[in-house]
Amino acid sequence: MERNDAEFAKLMALIGSLPAERLDEPFAGTARDRNVRDVVAHLHAWHILLERWYSEGTTGGTPAIPAEGYAWSRLADLNEDLRLQWQDTTLAELMPLLKASHESLQAMVALHTDAELDDPAAYAWTRGSALGEFAVECGGNHYAWGRATITAGLGMDE
């Protein structure tokens, strides 16, 4: 939870420090994520995926991980499809969604003990991965990736 909150705060500080004209500026290069909005949408979309996995898994279901119709070997395709799904949503609309989905992620983590979060066998639906690993990958590690992607895309020093 601490890493998730710390990295989220750094990401929000970075985005908040950008002048308005840079928020919509296209990134240099040909990366999948082409602007700040794409990065924010990507982070929010992965929160939604994790929420779906968690909801289905904790009610006895077997969630499609990473998503219905995708395997980890097709992660690039999934990420591109997620990017395309959010193209009609503005950054101003996405920011409160990201904040809310971060809070939801943290609330989910808070429901579990450290032992439960760290045990790869605690939940069958995680298929041998620890729930805490999912939480940090969709949280703190992903936020650090987002910061790096934004700074690189805008040609900034981190």
Image (tube, helix red, strand yellow):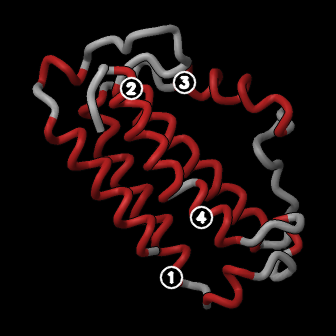
Q: Residues within 10 Å of mark 1 (few under 14, many from 20)?
A: few
Per the model, the C-alpha gap separating discs 2 and 3 is: 18 Å
Per the model, the C-alpha gap separating discs 1 and 4 is: 11 Å
Which of pointers 1 and 2 lies earlier in the amino acid sequence? 1
128 up-or-down from 29: above or below = below
48 up-or-down from 93: above or below = below
Task: Name the residue type under label 1.
Answer: Ala
In the image: residue 30, left or right of residue 98: right
Q: Report the residue marked by disc 4.
A: 135
Per the model, the C-alpha gap separating discs 4 and 2 is: 25 Å
Q: Are marks 3 and 4 in contact (CB under 8 Å)?
A: no
Per the model, the C-alpha gap separating discs 3 and 4 is: 21 Å
The residue lying at 70 percent from left, 86 percent from top is 116
Q: Report the residue marked by disc 3.
A: 83
The residue lying at 51 percent from left, 57 percent from top is 139
The residue lying at 52 percent from left, 48 percent from top is 142
Tell me the tag on residue 110: 1
Which of pointers 1 and 3 lies earlier in the amino acid sequence? 3
